[in-house]
Image (spheres, rainbow, N blue to C red):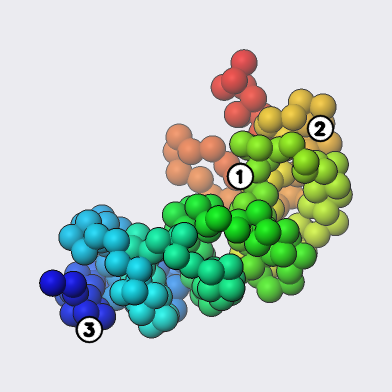
Amino acid sequence: MAMTLKETLTQLKALGDEKVRKHNKKNGAGDNQFGVKMGDIRKLAAKIKTNHKLAISLWDTGNSDAQFLAVLLLKPDNLSRDEMDRMVRSISFSHVADWLNSYVVKNHPDKEALRKTWMEEVAPWAARSGWSLTSERINKSPDGLDLPALLDRIESEMGKAAPEVQWTMNFCLAGIGIHFPKLRKRALAIGEKLGVYRDYPCSKGCTSPFAPIWINEMVRRQS
């Protein structure tokens, strides 16, 4: 028998952890969360299996943990283009945005049309998704992209972009520098000029998201 929304929320609440709640809040989540560990969300998703109707109901609660779970239960093909757009615009936590982009948006049949729309957006969560999809194309299917024009936009817009958008714009900048040697010098120069993430704290063994460091390290690994 399929779980109801109430039953699912009760289980999520029971899995809540105060340390996770504090960590999430520090990273931008609001109060509408239980603080469930990612591993526990994945276990619950495996128990429920794909359930598109329940996923939509979970998403619409606005609860971060319910939205993480919803992402794992959704069927991208069952979402209309307008529904996908609405979900992206309703995000309020960057980690939820990244899950939705990775598991749902990137598998949506209308993702290229949505990418083009979102790339012209001012709304930060829509723009973040647009640049995320563009980063995927830079890395996997760049044919048809005007990469010099993208660098122009990054140079003029990234420094003053909203933090939500800067993150995925930076992925595009690094991707161009890593994969396109003829544009590498310019990508490095833009990264140095803007200085975005220059002082970003990094754990030992991790590569800095500061584009010049990131680009040079990835190129070094490829050589």
Task: Confirm whether residue 96 shows in the render.
Answer: no
Q: Which residue is mark 2?
A: 183
Q: Say what amino acid the circle numbered 1 marks.
A: Glu
Left/right placement of residue 33 relative to residue 96 reads left
C-alpha gap between disc 3 and disc 2: 53 Å
Q: Give the residue drawn at x 72%, y 64%.
A: 117
Q: Which mark is residue 6?
A: 3
Q: Say what amino acid the circle numbered 3 marks.
A: Lys
Task: Confirm whether residue 1 shows in the render.
Answer: yes
Left/right placement of residue 24 relative to residue 162 reads left
Determine contact: label 2, label 1, CB under 8 Å.
no
Residue 146, percent from left and from top:
82, 43
Residue 157, percent from left and from top:
80, 59
Q: Quadrant of residue 162?
A: bottom right
Q: Which mark is residue 136?
A: 1
Residue 203, percent from left and from top:
45, 43
Residue 209, percent from left and from top:
60, 45
First of labels 3, 2 by sequence position: 3
Disc 2 is placed on an element classified as helix
Instruction: Quadrant for the C terminus, please.
Output: top right
First of labels 1, 3 by sequence position: 3
